[in-house]
Image (spheres, helix red, strand yellow):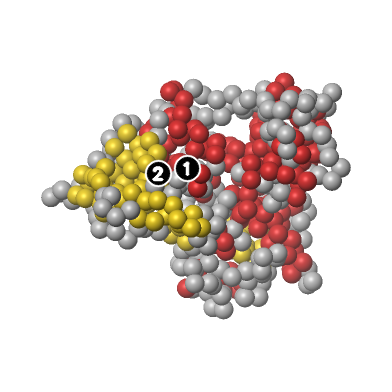
Amino acid sequence: MANMSLKKNAMPEQDAALRAHNFGEVALGYSREAAISEAERCLNCKNKPCVAGCPVAIDIPGFIDEIKKGEIEAAYGIVAKSSSLPAVCGRVCPQESQCEALCVRGIKGEPVGVGRLERFVADEHMKAAPAASERPASNGIRAAVIGAGPAGLTCAGDLARLGYEVTVFEALHLAGGVLVYGIPEFRLPKAIVQKEIDGLKALGVQIQTNMVVGKTVTIDELFEQGFRSVFIGSGAGLPSFLGIEGENLNGVYSANEFLTRINLMKAYEPSGQTPILAAKRIAVVGGGNVAMDAARCALRLGAEKVYIVYRRGMAELPARREEIEHAEEEGIDFRLLTNPVRINGDEKRNIVSMTLREMELGEPDASGRRRPVEKAGSDFDLDVDCVVIAIGTSPNPLIRSTTEGLETNKWGCIVADEGSGQTSRKGVFAGGDAVTGAATVILAMGAGKSAAAAMHAYMQGD
């Protein structure tokens, strides 16, 4: 029987006052009963508009229909045909602007909770401790993947299922890319990521860590070693800064460094592998998901006051609405329509404050958002002892500087065909943030999936 409620089934969560001081997962997941109830809100539309909004083209009505029948493992099987990382996507994919944005139920109410249901079936599959996937028969052709992030892992998984002998080369000591160094534990538990990676290894994917392509080995050398094709999914890990006075003071971090120390190296644990400043008043500059992650991590590290400093208003914040709401519930102070002009230090080069300038919104700029305009004579100081810069990243120049014939654009992104990922170098494909600049996990996965199909055609001589 259809559930015609205009609202989604609520997602159980940790209480805000409690979770603000721990790294446990905030969203606790649906029960079986809640998942079936939510699935029954789906109208199973014949034209499947939601699928058109999914970068990896999951058969959304198909897997939801299996949930309605209580066939959870069958539902997982449908999702897994299209997605190599369903438990990850169910947690961090911006469904509200993709599949759920096209849901018919969203016209007069809230859309079906597609992401919550995807997470549910993936988690139930993991709880059931299924036998490892059967490894496909090898076709004897070797393919290399650079970067063990969402794009690389997706590409590797799809190629392995087609019988290729895939080796992933990862610069860090742990596979996962942004899933392990960028997204906090309270949004994406690392044990979940590791289980997804273990599933790919069971398909025959080999992962070599501490391999910095461009230093340890070059793309030319990979071809010499017998790899027929190469996929570059090295992400965008080079942080941007403000270019203002005081950015070299003690206690100024890029969001990349701040989050990597916390998430990958567990700086919040007594036995963590790296220290991090025990700051009391922290300002995070930026308004995207990375800024929200950094601010919420700072709170959990024991900061007494955490600010989001953003030069536009609440309506223009690019972060997911859910992340903004969680940050507000936890007590993050949003200083909107303000922009840093200077970071001030003492004689020991420690931060004592940050000078901000008030802004107002003018006409829309190239991005379609209203342009922030400075208000003369509006400068004021905000007392802080740590500043985290979260205003964006770009691809590391190492691969492009060590690879002949690889075309890049003025932002340092690899130029690749939008549909196939084919680059200017024969046999080399690319996708994800290395091509687009910093974007979402699911878009990177979609690029990895498209590239795998194109690499398959290329390696088969088509």
Query: Quick one: quadrant of the C terminus?
Result: bottom right
Give the number of the disc on residue 73.
Answer: none
User: What residue type is disc 1 on?
Assistant: Met
**Residue linked to disc 1:** 314
Query: Quick one: quadrant of the N terminus?
Result: top right
**In the depicted view, which residue is nearer to us: 203 or 376?**
376
Q: Quadrant of residue 299?
A: top left
**Residue linked to disc 2:** 336
Res 210 visible: no
Q: Name the residue at 46% across, 63% down.
A: 396
Residue 248 position in % (x across, y down): 26, 56
**In the depicted view, which residue is nearer to us: 345 or 324?**
324
User: What residue type is disc 2 on?
Assistant: Leu
Q: Name the residue at 60% across, 38% down.
A: 91
Pointer 2 local density, CA inside 10 Å: few below 14, some 14–19, many at least 20: many
Pointer 1 local density, CA inside 10 Å: few below 14, some 14–19, many at least 20: some
Q: Quadrant of residue 238?
A: bottom left
Alpha carbons under labels 2 and 1: distance apart:
7 Å
Residue 62 position in % (x across, y down): 81, 39
Q: Are marks 2 and 1 in contact (CB under 8 Å)?
A: yes
Residue 415 position in % (x across, y down): 59, 70
Residue 334 position in % (x across, y down): 40, 39
Res 9 visible: yes
Up-down: is 359 above or below 121? Answer: below
